[in-house]
Image (cartoon, helix red, strand yellow):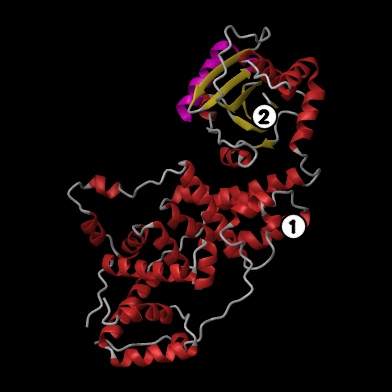
């Protein structure tokens, strides 16, 4: 059995208590409509100061939502426009979580409208029809294999694990962004991890 | 799976640093004595490590950043000089500015008579002529279709395709919001040489096609439908040119 190495923060076992989040429950969509009013120059500047630094993170999140780099660009741009127009409804709090909620709600709206072509990553499958998804995954090395495994997760599991592992968000933040109870977030993370363990060949050996 | 499935949520929460001290100590004690849970916990950590080692973060491409900044600049310009008017102010302004034709339209609108396609054509022709007055042509001035497309977002409830037709000799110069047929209408503005082509895009309401067109002499009007949208291209280019525009537009959208 491998020796267990506990990370210091885990060994301490103190849950980071982050409080006072002001993410609009469920996402920006609702507040977007309520607060669509022109921004004064000060708010417009504040929007840029707060939101432009989040663009890398928002794009990373969008890539995992859309599973397509180009669709992710459109999604991020649409989300910034929506966020800008809804910014009067932003009551402070975590700018990134607020923006992420807008990105997510924009994505869901696109999907519902059918306007978003989610392109399956099947370029390689075409190249070699004998490939099964599994052998494809094996052949791809390192980063690409991990990315493919994450992208293969169903939506609710994928967004939960991306917010947790890439953005290191707390259960509470993930629950607020995805408009789900914390218990649901936990079970989605557990499911995502078990699917990833299987896809990446990580086994619990006793 | 774990030897103790009921412990799995605790393992997850321990991994995520979400346990309070008492629960964390309890589960760590358990891990020392339960090989099954210890292995499961190691597997969870291995998954986390694989994710952390892979370069999964992808920075936003530079062109996306400049697109978004350009879009925000444009939004700032729109809201800065005068606060956005309520929709009916735009209607009122359009009516007062366009004289008799608009008055007819207003009367029809008030009495909820659906305008016929010919009346719509007349309204759009009016809008085209008005757009040629100084300062009326474009609300969003850019040849970047990635700026024009989202600009309409939230102003109208449909998304007109905005192809770039510069290679075909019809460069995009911007977009505008007009008002006709009792509703906001997207106008895409293209140029052909010194001529302006207004392409009005409406939601298709199945109005009958005008035959023949009542366009004034020297003006070309082309109407077509595609994918639930109603397209009206109006310009003072020659008939052949406006058909070439339609062909290019359809091929690119």
| Residue pictured at 40% horizontal, 57% vertical | A155
Height in image: B195 above or below A163?
Answer: above
Q: Residues within 10 Å of mark 2 (few under 14, many from 20)?
A: few
Residue at the front extreme of this rendering: B111
User: In the image, residue B207 lies at what x, y percent?
Assistant: 57, 18
User: In the image, residue B158 lies at what x, y percent?
Assistant: 57, 35
User: In the image, residue B98 lies at what x, y percent?
Assistant: 78, 20
Asked if the magenta segment contains residue B245, the reply would be yes
Secondary element at image label 2: strand
The numbered mark at residue A43 is 1
User: Tag 2, which chain?
Assistant: B
Disc 2 and disc 1 in contact, CB within 8 angstroms: no
Height in image: B46 above or below B68?
Answer: below
Q: Main secondary structure of the magenta part?
A: helix
Pick whichever, A78 or B190, lies toward us: A78
The mark closer to the camera, 2 or 1, is 2
Q: Is residue B109 visible?
A: yes
| Residue pictured at 48% horizontal, 28% vertical | B227
The boundaries of the magenta stretch are B235-253
User: Tag 1, which chain?
Assistant: A
Number of numbered markers: 2
Height in image: A137 above or below A37?
Answer: below
Task: Give the quarter of the image for residue B144.
Answer: top right
The residue labelled by disc 2 is: B183
Residue at the left extreme of this rendering: A130
Task: Give the quarter of the image for residue B162.
Answer: top right
Q: Is residue A47 left or right of residue A119?
A: right
């Amino acid at each position: 059995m491998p020796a267990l190495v506990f990370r210091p923060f885990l060994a301490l076992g103190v849950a980071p208590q982050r409080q006072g989040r002001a993410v609009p429950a469920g996402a920006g969509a609702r507040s977007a409509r309520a607060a669509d009013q022109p921004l004064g120059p000060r708010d417009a500047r504040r929007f840029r100061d707060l939101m432009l630094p989040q663009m890398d993170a928002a794009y990373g999140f969008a890539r995992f939502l859309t599973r397509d780099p180009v669709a992710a660009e459109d999604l991020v741009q649409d989300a910034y426009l929506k966020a800008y127009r809804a910014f009067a409804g932003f009551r402070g709090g975590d700018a990134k979580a607020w923006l992420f909620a807008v990105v997510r709600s924009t994505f869901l709206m696109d999907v519902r409208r059918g306007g978003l072509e989610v392109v399956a990553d099947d370029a390689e499958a075409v190249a070699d029809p004998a490939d099964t998804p599994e052998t494809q995954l094996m052949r791809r090395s390192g980063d690409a294999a991990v990315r493919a495994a994450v992208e293969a997760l169903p939506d609710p599991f994928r967004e939960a694990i991306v917010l947790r592992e890439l953005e290191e968000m707390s259960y509470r933040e993930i629950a607020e962004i995805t408009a789900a109870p914390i218990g649901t977030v936990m079970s989605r993370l557990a499911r995502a991890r078990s699917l990833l363990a299987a896809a990446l060949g990580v086994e619990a050996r006793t | 799976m774990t030897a103790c499935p009921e412990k799995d949520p605790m393992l997850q929460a321990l991994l995520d640093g979400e346990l309070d001290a008492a629960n964390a100590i309890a589960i760590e004690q358990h891990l020392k004595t339960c090989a099954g849970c210890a292995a499961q916990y190691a597997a969870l950590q291995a998954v986390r490590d694989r994710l952390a080692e892979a370069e999964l973060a992808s920075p936003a491409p530079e062109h996306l950043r400049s697109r978004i900044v350009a879009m925000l600049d444009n939004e700032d310009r729109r809201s800065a000089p005068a606060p956005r008017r309520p929709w009916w102010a735009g209607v009122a302004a359009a009516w007062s500015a366009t004289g008799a034709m608009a008055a007819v339209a207003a009367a029809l609108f008030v009495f909820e008579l659906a305008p016929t396609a010919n009346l719509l054509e007349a309204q759009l022709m009016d809008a085209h002529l008005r757009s040629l007055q100084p300062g009326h042509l474009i609300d969003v001035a850019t040849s970047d279709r990635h700026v024009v497309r989202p600009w309409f977002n939230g102003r109208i409830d449909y998304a007109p395709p905005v192809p770039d037709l510069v290679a075909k000799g019809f460069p995009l110069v911007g977009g505008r919001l007009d008002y006709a047929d009792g509703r906001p209408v997207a106008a895409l503005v293209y140029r052909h040489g010194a001529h302006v082509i207004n392409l009005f895009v409406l939601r298709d309401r199945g109005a009958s096609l005008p035959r023949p067109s009542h366009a004034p002499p020297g003006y070309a009007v082309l109407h077509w439908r595609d994918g639930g949208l109603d397209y009206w291209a109006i310009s003072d280019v020659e008939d052949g040119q406006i058909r070439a525009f339609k062909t290019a537009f359809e091929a690119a959208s």
